[in-house]
Image (cartoon, rainbow, N blue to C red):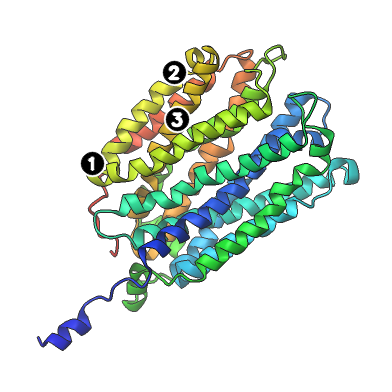
Amino acid sequence: MSISATQASAPSAPANSRGRVLFASLVGTTIEFYDFYVYATAAVLVFPHLFFPTGDDTTALLSSFAVFGAAMVARPIGSVVFGHLGDKHGRKLTLVGALLTMGIATFLIGVLPTHEQVGWFAAALLVVMRLAQGFALGGEWSGAALVATENAPAGKRAWYGTFPQLGAPIGFIIANGLFLIIAAALPSDDPSVPSEAFLAWGWRIPFLFSAVMVIVGLYVRLKLVESTSFTKAKETGTIQRLPLGTVLRSNWRELILGTFFMLATYVLFYLMTTFSLTFGRTPTDAAVPGLGYSYNTFVVMLIVGVVFFGIFTLVSGPLADRFGRRKTLIVVTLAIIAFGLLWVPLTGAGFVGVMLWLILGMSLMGFTFGPMGALLPELFPTNVRYTGSGISYNVSSILGAAVAPFIAVALWTAGGGSVFWVGVYLAGAGALTLVALLISKETKDIDIER
């Protein structure tokens, strides 16, 4: 074969630079998780007062968490719709559509009327916007993970895959940092209840601010080009007419395994963020006693913990590339099970114990969440990868995230303020994930362009 023919047949280098790939996969998930955290924080602080004034604090909180969980139901639907578009027409425009959907829904929450103004219609509008958020996030994560892993150099897929995962701690810090600044500017005389000004208008600022972040994200993502994996699938004619049907027929085992791989991660994540904010702020002399910290104090403690979440998300990538996704996650999942059984002694050991509880939980979150950015996409071939990884990730959100805060509050209430059964619930989720990992195979050496 001639030199010119050899050059013509050789695959071209990826058009996306390393910096563009990493930043594009990071910025979108940062915005998406920011929007999600803004809602999660408001679901604890604001929405029980403004949208669900039932007269009973626990009932109002559970109603707010129920709407929070409604988004998880919409996420698998979003993964199917955006996955279909991403597997048929490409990752780039699909990711732009997901980001726009999330941004518009979040902005509109910031201008919603409250129960005092329009009655229960306000809660209905909140449900619609929350469903739109979930629908968008259903398409965001898998697309961002594919941008990272399909453009990664050999031997570094797990490390590249940690960058969309890093959007979770960064989004948390921005969202809660902004709420913290607003709460400090609009202080309350009662640390367990936001101030009148905060309830009247201060809570809306983080939702409206999302519009600025979306503009930045769109600018970055519109500069992307398609990955060589998708381009190759398109050129060789392997694009499927109905990716959902193909993945259900040919990759059902991977769908089930991927769903349970994520279960412990989701339960840990929402217990350490949404539930902990409720537990940490509840007075020690309440009917169901909590830790008794003020909102400002506990959010600062949470942010410190989330810094460890971010650090160990990045650390997990090189470990998973060196030792394999399966071995790394088996060790981490065993640690999560043990951690769940230590909740009572840790949370009962004063400030140092609570701080250690947050740091350990968030560190384990980074270790378990980081490798998922590579593991779930690696389970599926290119022509159904967006759909398959998205369905696994988001069906698990129903089993784990949608019900985790609700179950945790119920177990905490049943325990009379003890979090023993909440920790057992986390350990149980970890046991299910461990079983899935033990019966699975290693994926780090698969061909991402298959």
**CA distance separating discs 1 and 3:** 24 Å
**At numbered mark 3, what does the secondary structure look like: helix, strand or loop?**
helix
Mark 3 highlights which residue?
Answer: 429
Question: Which one is in front in this view, the residue at disc 1 or the one at disc 3?
Answer: 1
Mark 1 highlights which residue?
Answer: 323
For this view, does 246 lie left or right of residue 395? left
User: From the viewer's perspective, is residue 273 above or below residue 128?
Assistant: above
Residue type, label 1: Phe
Residue positioned 77% across, 27% down in the render? 193
Residue type, label 3: Ala
Residue positioned 58% across, 14% down in the render? 418
Where in the figure is residue 20, as x and y percent of width and height?
42, 64
The quadrant in which residue 312 appears is: top left
> Which quadrant is the N terminus positioned in?
bottom left
Residue 152: in sight, yes or no?
A: yes
User: Do the residues bearing badges 2 and 1 touch, measured as CB atoms within 8 Å?
Assistant: no
Where in the figure is residue 108, as x and y percent of width and height?
74, 55
**At numbered mark 1, what does the secondary structure look like: helix, strand or loop?**
helix
Within 10 Å of disc 3 (Cα), the crowding (few <14, some 14-19, many 20+) is many
**Residue 341 got which mark?**
2
Where in the figure is residue 284, as x and y percent of width and height?
67, 13
Residue type, label 2: Leu
The mark that comes first in sequence, 2 or 1, is 1
Where in the figure is residue 129, as x and y percent of width and height?
70, 52
Q: Nearer the viewer, residue 100 or 184?
A: 184
The mark that comes first in sequence, 1 or 3, is 1
Residue 407: in sight, yes or no?
A: no
